[in-house]
Amino acid sequence: MPMMYGFGPQRRQMLDAELQRLIDEMPQLGMTSMFLVGPFARGEVGPGTALDLVVVQETDEPVHRRADFWTTHLRPRIGINFYVYTQDEFENPPSRDPVLHDAANNGERVYG
């Protein structure tokens, strides 16, 4: 497989631009806070790097349907994983949740 040089900075720019777009648009749709987690938050960028976002919003939707709201309304331009929690779930995590653990220990608060 051929090796690509210089792709990291371009991918980083794409991810940064998409993150800024989301920060600008999501509060109007009910987001109260958001944390960047995962590889991009740790500065690791490769061809498949996506934005991993912990989103806090009040919702009555079941956990497995919450990300659909954001995907449908924002139509991501790059790979994004939305992990959506209510404020109560965020403050009192259900059992040992690895995503919330990452947000609390390694995440970067990008809104709220």
Image (cartoon, grey):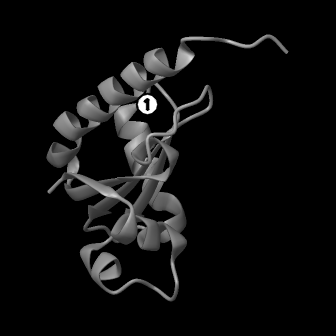
* Residue at (49, 52) in percent of width and height: 38
- The answer to which image quadrant residue 60 occupies is bottom left
Q: Amino acid at mark 1?
A: Pro
Quadrant where the C terminus is found in the figure: bottom left
Q: Residue at x 46, y 85 (%)?
A: 94
Relative image position of residue 2 (x, y in whole percent) = 80, 10
- Secondary structure state at the residue bearing disc 1: loop
Q: Residue at x 51, y 46 (%)?
A: 39
Residue depicted at 53% across the width and 72% down the height: 98
Where in the figure is residue 90, as x and y percent of width and height? 32, 76
Using the image, determine if residue 68 lies above or below residue 4. below
Q: Residue 48: where, in percent of width, then height?
A: 62, 31
Q: Position of residue 37 (x, y in %)?
A: 42, 54
- In this orientation, which residue lies closer to the viewer: 103 or 91? 103
- The residue wearing badge 1 is 76
The N terminus is located in which quarter? top right
Choose between 23 and 101: the one closer to the eye. Answer: 101
